[in-house]
Image (cartoon, rainbow, N blue to C red):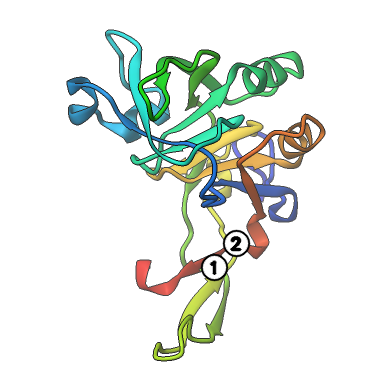
Amino acid sequence: MASEFGTKPDYDKMYSFDDPMATRPLRLGGADAAARTLDAFKLLWGEADLPAALKMQAYMGAQAADVLWTGWAVLVVISVRVQELLRAENATGWGTYPVEVYGRQGEHLPGYVGLMVSGRAGRQDKSRGDLLRKPALTRSGQPYDVRRGLYFAEDRWDGSDVCVVQGTGVIVVTERARELFRRGRITNVRFTRLSEFERSVLAE
């Protein structure tokens, strides 16, 4: 079925934009009172107005990277190098908001912006995907079930290179966008093909 926007998603050529959970890159948290009342989802979706740059300070890690992840889980900070790469290649579905990033010793780290996603996919379709039994993660643990495949209401995808699954913080990119990151050697991000994405059935 084609989308009302005229584009049908190919889940083998679309990827989740994920935190690789690396320990060496910096991880950011709020550095002022404004961060405590922030609606992180609305900021990611481009539906919140910031009166000033959002101040963030590293609380873990030691290395700067092209992509910095935060304690809000859904908020992502990117380097100006990433911003320029996306802009030069006319990638669609994204924008930025101003941030001030500080290292663990309070030193200002210039050259970063917050990633805002204006592209939209439909609501997640949790009925689709293969049910798999996974082995226990620890010797004393229990096997657990996951569903493989991340799917969404296809008629609501707007065809953007960068988009969010409706109502969530899940960022999805097209193969074209993933290739831009690969060629640009962008650090501290992981891509998982949507047809291979695994999610816990406990969240269904």
Q: Residue visible at 40% across and 21% down?
A: 102
Measured as percent of width and height from the top left, residue 179 is found at: 79, 37
Question: Earlier along the polypeptide chain: callout 1 or callout 2?
Answer: 1
Q: Which structural element holds mark 2?
A: loop
Q: Which residue is mark 1?
A: 128
Q: Nearer the viewer, residue 92 or 33?
A: 33
Badge 2: few (under 14), some or many (20 or more) residues near its Cα, within 10 Å?
Answer: some
Q: Residue visible at 59% across and 64% down?
A: 149
Q: Is residue 81 left or right of residue 147?
A: right
**What is the quadrant of residue 119 in the picture?**
top right
Q: Nearer the viewer, residue 84 or 151?
A: 84
**Mark 1 is on which residue type?**
Arg
Q: Residue visible at 34% across and 35% down?
A: 41
Q: Give the number of callouts.
A: 2
Measured as percent of width and height from the top left, residue 115 is found at: 50, 26
Q: Does 52 appear above or below 190?
A: above
Q: Residue visible at 58% across and 26% down?
A: 93
Please name which of the two marks, 1 or 2, marks the residue nearer to the observer: 2
For the C terminus, the quadrant is bottom left
Q: Which residue is mark 2?
A: 197
